[in-house]
Image (spheres, grey):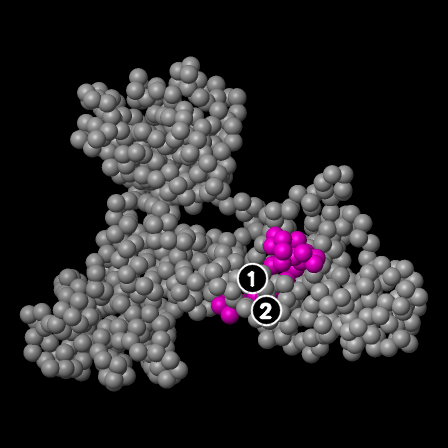
Amino acid sequence: MGRDLTALFDPRSVAVVGASDDPAKYGHAVAAQALRAPDRRPVHLVNRRGGTVLGRTAAPSLTAVGEPVDLVVISVPGAGFEAAVDEALACGAKALVAITAGFAEAGPAGLARQRAVAARVRAAGAVLVGPNCLGIADNTTELYLASDRFAPGGIALLSQSGNLALELQLRAEPHGLGFSRFVSLGNQADVTLVDLVEDCARHEATSAIAVYAEDFGDGRAFAAAAAAAGKPVVLLTAGRGTASARSAQSHTGALTTSADVVAAACRDAGVELVRTPREMTVVLAGLAGPAGPAGPGGGVRTRGRRTAVFTDGGGHGAIAADAAEDAGLQVPELGGPTQDRLRTVLWEQSSVANPVDLAGMGEQRPLSYADTVGALLDADEVDAVLMTGYFGGYAASEGGLGGGPAGGSVLAEGETRAAKEIVAHLASAAAKPLVVQSMYPGSPSCRVLAEAGVPVFAATEDAARALAAMTGRPGPVDTAGVTPLPRPAPPLSDPGYHGVRALLDAAGVPFPAAREITDEAGLLAAAAEFDGPYVLKALHLLHKSDAGGVALRLTDRDALLAAYREMHARLGAPAYSVEAMADLTDGIELIVGVNQDPRFGPVALVGLGGVLTESLRDVAFALAPVPARRAEALLRSLRSAALLDGVRGRPAVDVAAAAAVVERITTVAAAHPEIAELEVNPLLVRPDGALALDARAVLR
């Protein structure tokens, strides 16, 4: 069920320790906000000097309040912080909000102080937000303990940046978006992002969760909580582009960046990952827009991505179609029956293929907007509609907003009526997303749509991005989710080549026959155990191929012996591996690897393998372990995926067998946290199965 945060969001009483009349102090802003709802619960102001604060009598200490206090905000200098915490716990506080800074962010000594305080709070059965935070607010319980006001609405905002939270609030207002809760995460010494996501998921008044996070703490737990939330989760994060393993010793480690890891976690968890505050607002407008007579408004979602672009001008339609496809939507040509239906409501010069273009009919009959939107929403082959262009311009002219032809009052009236009919159709039809881009988003007719919950944007790319968030994701629906980690296995005792092969072989990963040898006698004995052609590998080298430590297609024992003598004279490796040469005919080389991320745990990579892996960089990522169905979806998402199904006369390879091997490799890696990097490269996939040809492990 997660942690009980009732005392944090709906306390019976509140005290602000460090309340002040000095506007330069944070205790002044928090105290002023706390007093906005004095009738909801008792609010006590505490200042060590006593006297009055904001015209109210202030207690010189929390103890002097004389009654238990459920929630205590602490905004005092760092030297007095621990004493304030101890007094709050002694007075029965069940929740603390620590504004005071100077802890983990200040270095090891501060981290030690922070951990000690958090331990005391947990031992007392209380919860702590912060330290080094900017407060909290809950509009649903009239709890105002942050320096700024947040308009009421359905979004829970969890942020590690106060200024970004304020920017999001400003950007949200024009879209009619508001907030159920705001929490400044601070250092997450006790209450974590995961705790808050889980609690907001249970919060009935929250329809979407917006997160700005620089430190996920336990990133995998965050992904799992988001996946289980049952509500949209939108994430804005920083530092995604830095390499997570700059000293990586495998292709997997070198190819895995923080951006890849975060994107994979978000995809698996169903989280909408955004890059800027503007994009976050756009996505939230699509997922959590204000409800209206048409229903849940921006909350309408669909699994399909087949989008009808509807416009009143060819240029807007072409640009919108490109923007939709750039956002991952599909803009297919409409089928014959749908085109025939559109021809019954449009005139001859209108285009009905997709984009659908009124071609000037809007000026002759404004209700054609509503007729066309209705026909598109009713079409089974259409999952969503993007209306773009001049709609709103006629009513804008009437309202003095600079749009539409002169004397357009009749057109303005017709356009507003069309907007109302679109709303009525949305209320009566099966729920499908409709998003509007208008040159005049503030016009009366566009406001009719917006107030009914239809997202309206000025920018085409914003409309397309919002619609993409409201539609399904590519690939099978049942491949999403965060697979739990397996139980830890006994640590790998032999991280050498044959030790890793043995570990994977025990898990069902197939390899060619192989023997480890250290001299010519061992080489000849190994060659006698299986027929050629042979492969010879020098062991204990980081990148064998780069060092010339791999010899292929050695036809017989004499060729094998000659290759060994040349390689040993040149490299002097302590050991070698003699292996049966795999049949490479009609095969494709893949790479399968797992890298241990410090925040998200084991992260899997699959892609085109072999010696050109890092050059081609055709790879996909997922949180490990990766079930076979998801592994197949990842392989199908590669740029080179067409190779898997056969090209230019080559037969298709056994993708299902490759996916099964991916599941086994990633499960082994997930069960061995001591392995920093585990890699099979190449994994040869042929029409008749899959075979691992090389393996490597790097311990932490």
Residue 666, which numbered label?
A: none
Q: Quadrant of residue 313?
A: top left
Residue 30, percent from left and from top = 19, 68
Q: Is residue 397 left or right of residue 364?
A: left
- Label 1 or label 2, whichever comes before in sequence order: 2
Mark 2, residues whose alpha carbon is within 10 Å: few (<14), some, or many (≥20)? some
Q: Quadrant of the C terminus?
A: bottom right
Residue 3 drawn above or below residue 658: below
The residue closer to the viewer here, 590 or 421, is 590
Residues at marks 1 and 2 touching, judged by CB atoms closer than 8 Å: yes
The residue closer to the viewer here, 305 or 229, is 305
> Could you tell me the amino acid type at mark 1?
Thr
Residue on which disc 2 sits = 248
Residue 194, percent from left and from top = 41, 65
Looking at the image, can residue 666 be seen? no
Span colored in magenta: 591-618
Residue 278 drawn above or below residue 34: above
Report helix, strand or loop for mark 1: loop
Residue 256, which numbered label?
A: 1
Report helix, strand or loop for mark 2: loop
